[in-house]
């Protein structure tokens, strides 16, 4: 068994990989006492022979998770850092480590699952977009604020935009709350559609569009094209990476 850890900006997701399936899984927000909550939960889990993690957060939160794995299982994670090439995927960045490891692992999952050529969109704290061709070459991507972060930035930079309630997405909003929500969600949807149009020219015309992240289900109906919802793409990419980089002792 392999314990997989996905340390995202909003929350930590984890899963216990047994063969090709997730035997157990869970998630915690960063407002929890991570070290205590995790070590308590994991004491009831089977002992993994490896722990592999991917992180886009700061060293302090990585350390808190490592403390929890040490308490529960007597071992710390091996952290995957973004490579130039792995699992059939080639990173487009001249400085490979500057590409978020979550984006790279989502492409690993897409390539392993046979979805390339494709456009990958992830809607969470940030909205990230990447193009992956059929040979596993990452062609590049875009980064923008996610829908909720976009709304928070408007609220933080204005004095008069102070809706008293959470808005809904409408075609033509007649109040501030709905106007703010509608503008930000539709802006993200339009960005996904525009990126897909631009990337299609280099991906053979009609690439698959996959959508992940915590806000994927809300964003999907706003798009002008069909999207495949791919939850837990980072964990699945991490599983593919862990299998490809298994120590010789695990294979024997």
Image (tube, rainbow, N blue to C red):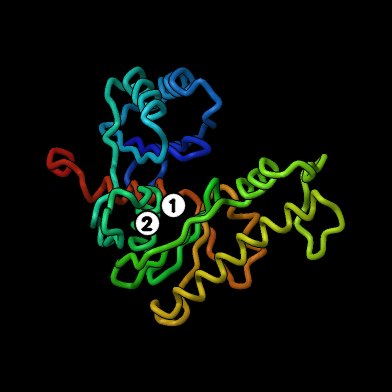
Quadrant in which the N terminus appears: top left
Percent position (x, y) of residue 14?
Answer: 43, 36
Which residue occupies 35% across, 54% down? 104
Percent position (x, y) of residue 37?
Answer: 49, 21
User: Vertical placement of 141 versus 76: above or below?
Assistant: below
Which residue occupies 39% across, 46% down? 21
Q: Residue furthest right?
A: 174
Percent position (x, y) of residue 31?
Answer: 55, 26
Please state which of residues 244 and 56 is positioned toward the viewer in this rendering.
Answer: 56
Disc 2 residue crowd, few under 14, some 14–19, many 20+, Cα 10 Å:
many
Task: Determine the secondary structure under disc 2.
Answer: helix
Which residue occupies 42% across, 69% down? 118
The residue carrying mark 2 is: 109
User: Vertical placement of 48 versus 135: above or below?
Assistant: above
Image position of 157 (left or right of 80): right
Residue 44's image quarter?
A: top left
**Mark count:** 2
Percent position (x, y) of residue 159?
Answer: 76, 41
Disc 1 residue crowd, few under 14, some 14–19, many 20+, Cα 10 Å:
many
Decide: marks 1, 2 in contact (CB < 8 A)?
yes
Which residue occupies 33% across, 65% down? 138
User: Mark 1 or mark 2, which has the lower sequence index?
Assistant: 2
Residue 85's image quarter?
A: bottom left
Task: Determine the secondary structure under disc 1.
Answer: helix
Please state which of residues 14 and 85 is positioned toward the viewer in this rendering.
Answer: 85
User: Vertical placement of 232 versus 191: above or below?
Assistant: above
Please state which of residues 67 and 42 is positioned toward the viewer in this rendering.
Answer: 67
Which numbered circle lies on residue 243? none
The residue carrying mark 1 is: 233
Please state which of residues 236 and 64 is positioned toward the viewer in this rendering.
Answer: 64
């Amino acid at each position: 068994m392999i314990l997989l850890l996905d340390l995202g900006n909003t929350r930590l997701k984890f899963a216990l990989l047994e063969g090709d399936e997730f035997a157990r899984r869970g998630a915690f927000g960063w407002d929890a006492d991570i070290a205590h909550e995790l070590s308590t939960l994991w004491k009831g889990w089977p002992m993994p022979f490896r722990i592999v993690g991917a992180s886009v957060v700061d060293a302090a939160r990585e350390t808190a998770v490592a403390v929890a794995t040490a308490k529960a299982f007597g071992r710390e994670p091996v952290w995957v850092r973004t490579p130039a090439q792995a699992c059939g995927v080639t990173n487009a960045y001249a400085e490979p480590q500057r590409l978020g490891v979550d984006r790279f692992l989502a492409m690993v999952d897409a390539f392993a699952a046979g979805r390339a050529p494709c456009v990958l969109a992830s809607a969470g704290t940030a909205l990230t977009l990447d193009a992956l061709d059929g040979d596993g070459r990452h062609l590049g991507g875009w980064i923008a604020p996610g829908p909720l972060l976009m709304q928070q930035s408007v609220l933080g930079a204005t004095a008069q935009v102070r809706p008293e309630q959470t808005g809904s997405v409408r075609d033509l909003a007649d109040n501030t709350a709905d106007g703010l929500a509608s503008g930000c969600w539709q802006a993200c949807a339009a960005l996904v559609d525009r990126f897909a149009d631009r990337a299609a020219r280099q991906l053979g015309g009609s690439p698959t569009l996959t959508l992940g992240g915590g806000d994927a289900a809300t964003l999907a109906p706003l798009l002008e094209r069909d999207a495949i919802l791919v939850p837990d793409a980072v964990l699945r990419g991490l599983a593919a990476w862990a299998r490809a980089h298994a120590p010789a002792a695990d294979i024997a």
